Image (cartoon, rainbow, N blue to C red):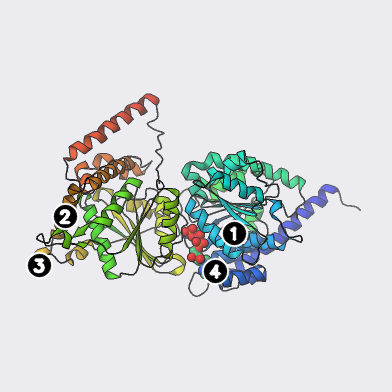
Amino acid sequence: MGMKKSEKGSKQVMENKRNENKVVGNAASNATIGNDGVFASCSFSSLGLHPSLCDELREKLGFEVPTLVQAQAIPVILAGRHALINAATGTGKTVVYLAPLIHHLQNYDTRIQRSDGTFALVLVPTRELCLQVYEILQKLLHRFHWIVPGYVMGGENRSKEKARLRKGISILIATPGRLLDHLKNTSSFLYTKLRWIIFDEADRILELGFGKDIQEILDLLGSTKAANDNVENKVPRNSKFQRQNLLLSATLNDKVNHLAKISLHNPVMIGLEGKTREPVSTIESIDPSESDEDDEVKYSSKIPTVVDYKIPTQLIQRYVKVPCGSRLAALLSILKHLFERDASQKVVVFFSTCDAVDFHYSLLSEFHFSTDPQTKEGDRQMFLGCRTFRLHGNMEHEDRRSTFQAFKTEKSALLFSTDVSARGLDFPKVRCIIQYDSPGEATEYVHRVGRTARLGERGESLLFLQPAEIDYLQDLEKHGVSLTEYPLLKVLDNFPLYGQNKLAKKSVFIDLHPWVLCLQKALESFIVSKPKMDELARKGFCSWVRAYTAHRGELKRIFMIKKLHLGHVAKSFALKQQPSLVGQSFQKQNKKRKRFEKKSGLSKRRKVPRVT
Ligand SMILES: Nc1ncnc2c1ncn2[C@@H]1O[C@H](COP(=O)(O)OP(=O)(O)OP(=O)(O)O)[C@@H](O)[C@H]1O
């Protein structure tokens, strides 16, 4: 007896699912951990990648074997599945999505052409990450010259971008704002053959307030789940233009739920709870025919609100408890200690605001120091001998670009940055991360420290906390992150002080330590003597306090503006001025803000975006 059309259809769906499950199953078995816990004990070709691409991975990037997440995820992506991928920082997520794209695009029966337009879209939160992904893509496409890589991002020349889009870009890397701009205004931007949409650092894209843009982008591309279902109705299941969306980050949390819900279709979850989700049950538990409401319930249970973050196991994580007024002296002392211990290394220091970056960068570029008060100014040595860079969102686009490239290639250097460097950037050989201003959300802590200890390399991180902020450690503990204390007094004791014997230098209080007192005095004199520095310090102070008030939710309990002694904050910018003067101007601003909030009923919902 002949089978009914609908029965035939459902049998076909079951068969497809079985085939997909086989691939996902293979992925799990491929992902056996190698001896080092970072790489898998298999080859790239065993994952199903084309031999030429495997050669390219080896020759152009020096990748011999896949990392664990690559071994888990590449077969899943090659099979055409939507996926949500969570793996620790520095474990090779970029190649997780780039390799399958290239594999498929170079495999088309008829070679793709520029006039076909865009096949794949990679969305990233920052310009630097955009460039970084583009550079890797360029290398990987060396022998596949007919696949054209390109990028569009804020700060670039729109007309030039339009011209490139008109010619055709096969794989496009983009920041959301600029992409939306082109989707609306560049009529020659062709994306009718778009097959992949990838969100790298998905949670950050949403946190930066791009949620609306993303919704609009997905709508314009017809790639929301609803639209996707429609596409599936029209396009045969094995069509090469069927959509496949991927979300990746080291910290996929509840914020990604909505994006996953609207953009992923029957996804495979990789790396949540530390292992590949049981492939068969994952696939069978999310039925594409189920309603959105049901999906939401399921996603929420898949991406828990409180998750243990994955931190590279070899990373040494410490905190240092420093009274507010001694923060600057402590930071400079620790940096001096680090570079004296090893002159050839890279260190990144994170600050909460662009102004704070500018102040500290200028200070260290100019500050000369001697513990002997008799030493003439011209004879004093630079406090730190290493090259110093700065990176933040208020810099000129070209400066940002050149700093990013320069810090990448330097062997020994110090980078002062806002969170613009916290996500995805792969600066080789960074040895230490210092979080001078606390990161706020635990997710940001994870990404900041993730700039070191990448791919099994050693690394250390140091979090500055004031005594009143020490509860922040508990907040990190909730996510399985625990830190040990840094022996600051021991480090301070080791600095030579002119005319004092070793015993006299010791102090049990950081703020009374003779080295700290001597350094603080020199810093304050330096600032007073340079009007430009004084101005930078004041600006830095004001924006720092403003950023401190912007901590949200639970964190407000830990970072309480009321507990701050503004005079001590001023001291941490080496300002000698009457703290009340600086404080008053802030308090006026604060009162004005509160009045405004009260009037407009905003006080509960206020969310101050950070300029990074
Ligand atoms: N299979 C591999 N073999 C050797 N090196 C690799 C391999 N895969 C990736 N790498 C290198 O590992 C580093 C980290 O890779 P990548 O930047 O993709 O990590 P990530 O997981 O995206 O990190 P983050 O979460 O910080 O964005 C890079 O320097 C990259 O070149």
Which element carries disc 1, helix, strand or loop? helix
Q: Residues within 10 Å of mark 1 (few under 14, many from 20)?
A: many
Instruction: Identify the residue under disc 3.
Output: 503
Residue 316 can be seen in this image? no
Mark 4 C-beta closer than 8 Å to ligand 1: yes
Q: Which mark is residue 61?
A: 4
Residue 41 vs 79, above or below: the answer is: below
In front: 457, or 109?
A: 109
Q: Residues within 10 Å of mark 2 (few under 14, many from 20)?
A: some
Instruction: Identify the residue under disc 2.
Output: 522
For marks 4 and 1, give the CA distance: 15 Å
Among the two numbered marks 2 and 1 on one chain, the one whose residue lies closer to the N terminus: 1
Q: Are marks 3 and 4 in contact (CB under 8 Å)?
A: no
Instruction: Identify the residue under disc 1.
Output: 97
Among the two numbered marks 1 and 3 on one chain, the one whose residue lies closer to the N terminus: 1
What residue do we see at 82% from left, 52% from top? Answer: 8
